[in-house]
Image (cartoon, grey):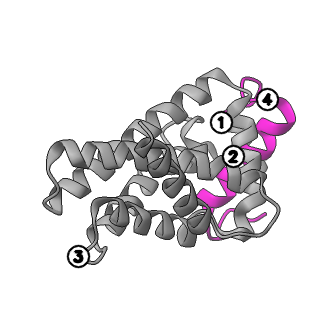
Amino acid sequence: MARWEPNAAERLSRAALDLFAERGYENTTVIDIAERAGLGKTTFFRHFPDKREVLFGGDKMAALLADAIATAPGSAAPLEAVAAAFDAAGREAFTLARREIVARRAAVIAANPELLEREALKGLGLIAAMTDALERRGVPDLTARLAAQLGALAMKVAYDRWIDGGAGEEFGEVARRALSELQAAAALY
């Protein structure tokens, strides 16, 4: 693959995912990833600060969720705004065409404690981004935090279900259903 071809970040991410699955995370170097992508080490570090981040996409998901919450209809209740963010995540990141890649990524992360730790930190960042976006909409602090926490749990449940599901459902549908189920379960207590 020529070095000048577009989508270097995507090529690096796919190469990393392939190598992590083949060799394991610990046995793969940045140089291995860059070479598999047909790029140099310097190009890798232009796109990612370290080899962990190649699977996590920086703050793109947090920004996507926050933007979708911000642009939800003004009349939307906090959890409706969070559900709008799920729809955006489904359109932009968790498409049916990407389900196999997302499932492979999840398997690689599950096999490595360092990556699991990074995934947990990313989850905290998503909660903070959703909380902040809700507060900017005028939602009181405690309500914003609760909606963001519930949204993050629904998103995790939906993510796991969507990866495992074979029915061809859109991520947004799965996430909205998970959010409804969590709301119903919370109402029982």
The amino acid type, in three-letter code, at marker 2 is Ala
As drawn, is 64 to the left or to the right of 6? left
Q: Which residue is mark 2?
A: 34
Residue 35 in view (yes/no) = no
Magenta-tinted stretch: 1-30
Q: Which residue is mark 3?
A: 75
**How far across and down, in percent of the image, does residue 136 sit?**
16, 59
Residue placed at 56% from the left, 51% from the top? 43
The amino acid type, in three-letter code, at marker 3 is Ser
Quarter of the image that includes the N terminus? bottom right
Q: Residues within 10 Å of mark 4 (few under 14, many from 20)?
A: some
Q: Which residue is mark 4?
A: 24
Disc ID at residue 180: none
Marks 4 and 2, the one that precedes in the sequence = 4
Where 40 falls versus 50 (above or below)? below
- 3D distance between C-alphas at marks 1 and 2: 6 Å
Q: Nearer the viewer, residue 13 or 99?
A: 99
Q: How many marks?
A: 4
The amino acid type, in three-letter code, at marker 4 is Gly
- 3D distance between C-alphas at marks 4 and 1: 13 Å
As drawn, is 14 to the left or to the right of 138? right
Confirm or deny contact between disc 1 and disc 2 (CB under 8 A): yes
- 3D distance between C-alphas at marks 1 and 3: 47 Å
Q: In which quadrant of the rendered view does residue 168 lie?
A: bottom right
Where 36 falls versus 99 (above or below)? above
Residue placed at 84% from the left, 31% from the top? 23
Q: Which residue is mark 1?
A: 30
Where 125 falls versus 135 (above or below)? above
- 3D distance between C-alphas at marks 3 and 2: 47 Å
Q: Nearer the viewer, mark 4 or mark 1?
A: 4
Marks 3 and 2, the one that precedes in the sequence = 2
